[in-house]
Image: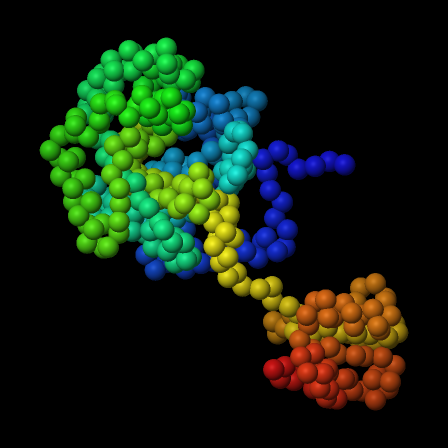
Amino acid sequence: MITKPKGTIDFLPEDTIKRQHIEEKLRLISSVFNYKEIRTPTFEKTELFKRSIGEETDIVSKEMYSFSDNEFTLKPEMTAPVIRAYLENNLQNISPVHKLYYISNMFRHERPQAGRFREFSQFGAELIGSNDYSADIELISFGHYFLSAFGIKEIRIKINNIGNISERSLYINDLKQFLESYKNDLSEDSRKRLSRNPLRILDSKDKKDREIISNAPVLYDFLGSRNRLHFQNVLEGLSDLGINYDIDYSLVRGLDYYTSTTFEILSDTLGSQNALLGGGRYDLLSEQIGGKSTPAIGFACGLERMSMVLDAIKYKFPEYNPPMLYFVTSGEPAKKKVLLLISKLRTQGIICETDLLSRSIKAQMKEANRFNAKFVIVIGENELEANEIRIKRMIDGSEVRINFDNLTNYSFE
């Protein structure tokens, strides 16, 4: 038997009902914040991700699914494709600020684990065109709001400011000098990054690396007055909204396009897999992929991990909408008559079901109960001769008889 690829998910009907609810609620909340949906191709030119994410990142160096000619890649993240679409379609000529959201599948060749898959879905938001601190506050509050709207509690925000290129360059020099003295104690991955991209070492999850990093120079100390003021305004704005946060000076995020504000939103519901949402400002990304300088900030949230949290907190998902009517038939003439009736009723938006296996009346009644149908309509030879049908209300067993011609106008309540 052929099985699904490692690190992928089959969404069975009961799973799909939950995912549809999550997506519908996210779309509603996005509309309240006046974010509009954007969709981009499943694959993009490989160069887009090499320029934007960074060739030394794990995503580009280890995790991308690229075609054999290496010209195209299944998208591992969505921010670069959104900015590509923004530039290619000249959205900046329509309005100076665009607020966009997406719900899309992404692909990364990494080790599958709880809440992390090789094909996964993300909900994300991008606020493009503003470098004002108010944009940072709005986007972070958007992320905090939608998680709270799903009943997720004990939400924690970690936030940092990683400065601009010149500020980071000064910092990286000091960081590199500091880490060189611990080179032999660093993990293998961190030793490789030391010469090529030492800032990525701050992302390390290795226990020994974390101990070393805890004594490393702090990037915030290298920020100029402009970035410090921006950061302070963001923090004050979050406080004014009653949103709690923790400053984490080691938070740099894993992609090269981030500048200035970076943040993560966490919940301890799943233990160590506690990061639900992450993002930051990426004011240089547009230039990196060939466009004009365009400030922007965004976040992304993995829907698989979010679903796990909702299950853990026993979130009340809507139940499956059962058929309003189940038609029980006896004999070929009745079966043909029912197919016509169902066709008319479905055009009125009434959910109908009937037997497709020519089973006994007893078996059909069992099936109606399994479907949890609200009404059962029995049609056989006698009903055809009398030109009437029996409608049974399943909740109390009461029955009525009506003329065939009145069925499509009958009020099922």
The correct choice, above or below, for 52 with respect to 280 in the image is above
Q: Residue at x 34, y 12 (%)?
A: 183
Query: Is residue 72 visible in this depiction of the protein?
Result: no
Q: Position of residue 405 (x, y in %)?
A: 72, 85
Judged left or right of residue 111, residue 155 is left
The correct choice, above or below, for 34 with respect to 52 in the image is below
| Colour scheme in use | rainbow
Q: How many marks?
A: 0
Judged left or right of residue 200, residue 173 is left
Q: Residue at x 22, y 16 (%)?
A: 173
Quarter of the figure that contains the C terminus? bottom right
The correct choice, above or below, for 168 with respect to 122 in the image is above
Using the rendered view, name the quadrant where residue 7 is placed: top right
Q: Position of residue 384 (x, y in %)?
A: 84, 83
In depth, the one of 74 and 235 nearer the eye is 235
Farthest left residue? 225
Q: Position of residue 19 (x, y in %)?
A: 53, 53
Q: Residue at x 70, y 67 (%)?
A: 371
In depth, the one of 89 and 143 nearer the eye is 143
Q: Position of residue 69 (x, y in %)?
A: 54, 21
Query: Is residue 239 visible in this depiction of the protein?
Result: yes
Using the rendered view, name the quadrant where residue 398 is placed: bottom right
In depth, the one of 251 and 42 nearer the eye is 251
Quarter of the figure that contains the N terminus? top right
Q: Residue at x 86, y 67 (%)?
A: 359
